[in-house]
């Protein structure tokens, strides 16, 4: 099962991916609303195994430590986003909210690493550009790409914040994401789902140079 719902003031897409036979789950991008996430895990009877963070912006990582304390699950985040994680008070100030408590991740998410559940193995793709530690997660059995803020329906992630680089995000998308098959479903960090085929056809940032 997969359940995706917006969390926090920036409506970050948080997902619970669960194996109901093994009673295991992972959570991706628990940016906020941790009590709701924790309640859903309990209602579904799922034990949380991993907390996966696509990048260290506050709206994606803000609730991770709270969720770890409630469940004991380790936090995974690419090490290139550690400088951003340390900037949490500044990130909170940009939004005018209180800074959530953070801690270094238990493990780095590295390119080519396999994370997730036995039933839903996820291939980590390091796709820098929105931030230096941005990753996408490709779940081949589900034909699903969890894209973080690298790729949106009709757009791409902003690159004007610290650690952002426009040429790099374009390169990441062209070399890593465009090779994925048209029928691959894309779950972005914000907004509606799309497919690689739809984005290949209509996303202005994905057209050949
Ligand atoms: Zn972001």
Image: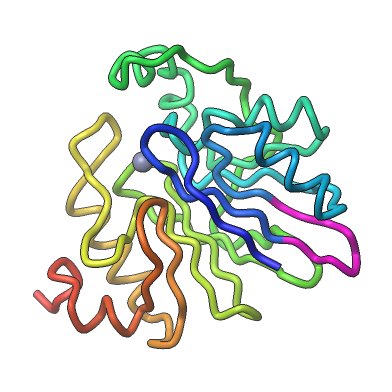
Residue 52 screen position, x and y as percent = 62, 46
So how many labels did they put on this image? 0
**Which one is in front, 115 or 25?**
25
Left or right of residue 78, residue 67 in this image: right
Quarter of the view holding residue 195: bottom left
Residue 95 screen position, x and y as percent = 31, 21
Quarter of the view holding residue 153: bottom left
Left or right of residue 52, residue 38 in this image: right
Image position of 72 with respect to 126: above or below: above
Q: Quadrant of the C terminus?
A: bottom left
Left or right of residue 13, residue 179 in this image: left
Residue 201 screen position, x and y as percent = 21, 84
Figure quarter occupied by ligand 1: top left
**Which one is in front, 147 or 175?**
147
Residue at image coords 68%, 60%: 17
Image position of 164 with respect to 177: above or below: above
Image coloring type? rainbow
Residue at image coords 22%, 45%: 158
- Residue found at the very far left of the displayed protein: 209
Residue 18 screen position, x and y as percent = 75, 61
Residue at image coords 44%, 29%: 58
Based on the picture, tell me whether residue 43 belongs to the magenta stretch.
Answer: no
Range shown magenta: 18-26
Image position of 158 with respect to 1: above or below: above
Residue at image coords 54%, 61%: 137
Image position of 148 with respect to 203: above or below: above
Q: Quadrant of the N terminus?
A: bottom right
């Amino acid at each position: 099962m997969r359940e995706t719902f917006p969390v926090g003031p920036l409506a970050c897409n948080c997902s619970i991916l669960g194996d109901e036979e093994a009673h295991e789950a992972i959570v991706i991008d628990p940016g906020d609303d941790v009590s709701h996430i924790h309640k859903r895990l309990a209602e579904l009877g799922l034990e949380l195994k991993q907390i996966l963070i696509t990048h260290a912006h506050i709206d994606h990582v803000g609730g991770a430590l709270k969720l770890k304390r409630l469940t004991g699950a380790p936090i995974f985040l690419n090490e290139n986003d550690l400088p951003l994680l340390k900037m949490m008070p500044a990130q909170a100030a940009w939004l005018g909210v209180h800074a959530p408590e953070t801690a270094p991740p238990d493990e780095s998410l590295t390119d080519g690493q396999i994370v997730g559940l036995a039933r839903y193995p996820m291939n980590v793709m390091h796709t820098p550009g929105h931030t230096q530690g941005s990753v996408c997660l490709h779940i081949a059995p589900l034909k699903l790409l969890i894209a973080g803020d690298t790729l949106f329906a009709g757009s791409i992630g902003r690159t004007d914040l610290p650690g952002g680089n426009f040429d790099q995000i374009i390169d990441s998308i062209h070399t890593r994401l465009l090779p994925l098959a048209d029928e691959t479903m894309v779950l972005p960090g914000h907004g509606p789902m799309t497919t690689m085929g739809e984005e290949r056809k209509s996303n202005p940032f994905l057209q050949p140079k």
